[in-house]
Image (tube, rainbow, N blue to C red):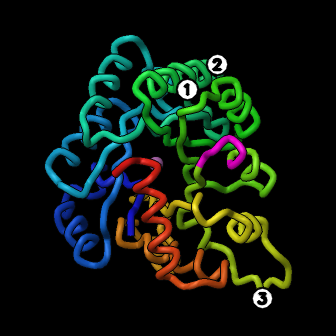
Amino acid sequence: MIDTHTHIDFKEFDDDRENVIKRFFENGGEKMINVGCDLKSSIRSYELAKNNENIFASAGIHPHDADTVDKNSLKKIEELVQHYKVIAVGEIGLDYFRNLSSQEKQIEAFKLQIELAENHNMPLIIHCRDAYNDLLDILKEYKTSNWRGVIHCFAASQKIAEEFLKLGFYIGFTGIVTYYKDKSELGNELEIYKVIKNMPLDKILIETDCPYLSPVPERGKRNEPLFVKHIAEKIAHIRNTSFKEIEKTTSENAVKLFNL
Ligand code: NI
């Protein structure tokens, strides 16, 4: 299993970080990507990656902190992405749900970091909430032949998923997919089930986004990389296939996209 989106540098793990890492790697975990969301966490992610063979890092500034994107911070992100264990630019994107930075500033910060990724031929880790139309417009505007990435924590419609797939993006699923009741109990097909069922297998990634979004049956507790297995299990269940197949293909997908 590869958890493609962790935040184990966060203070929630200060007391037992080494044990959390160990639990993952001793129970089927192969690799994890610790994702930066501001300058400080990008540096911490890089440090974690530098000190652990199977931990990789991304560097980038989240839309919540778009206000902090300036020449100086971009220069530091650019220095980080040149280290071989830093394998993506992210998480970057748009968040119109919380709007912690203005939408104009978010768009500007997103574009600047896309350019940075393009200059260094890096994949993108994209965060998007309530801003899919603007985000798609920007991605279409910047589409080039060699850029690629993942739409992290996907929770939108089949139609929007198809737009991202057309642009060549991978789709990342978190514990959110485990929050819905079984289709047979509901009697009709949920949109997220439809998305997962129709997704080409070679475009699916699994991610915890820990410490947030703990999947069932751990919901309500602090999330950790090992719990990514519950997401793989749920996807296997929805697609009527085996855990092994989801585990294997999502790992292959992550290795391919991020060149791990
Ligand atoms: Ni995240």
Secondary structure under tag 1 reads: helix
Please tell me which residue lies in front, 54 or 105: 54
Residue sitting at x 64%, y 19%: 104
Q: Quadrant of residue 148?
A: top right
Q: CA distance from mark 2 to mark 1?
A: 10 Å
Depth-wise, is mark 2 or mark 1 nearer the camera? 1
Tell me the amino acid under the disc marked 2: Glu
Q: CA distance from mark 1 to mark 3?
A: 41 Å
Residue sitting at x 27%, y 49%: 9
Q: CA distance from mark 3 to mark 2?
A: 44 Å
Picture mark count: 3
Residue 21 magenta-highlighted:
no
Residue sitting at x 66%, y 31%: 139
> Which residues are drawn in magenta?
165-169
Residue sitting at x 33%, y 17%: 75
Q: Earlier in the sequence, mark 1 or mark 3?
A: 1
Q: Which residue is mark 3?
A: 184
Secondary structure under tag 2 reads: helix
- Whole-percent x, y for residue 135 in the image: 68, 34
- Whole-percent x, y for residue 64 in the image: 51, 33
Q: Which residue is mark 1?
A: 110
Q: Which residue is mark 2?
A: 104
Depth-wise, is mark 3 or mark 2 nearer the camera? 3
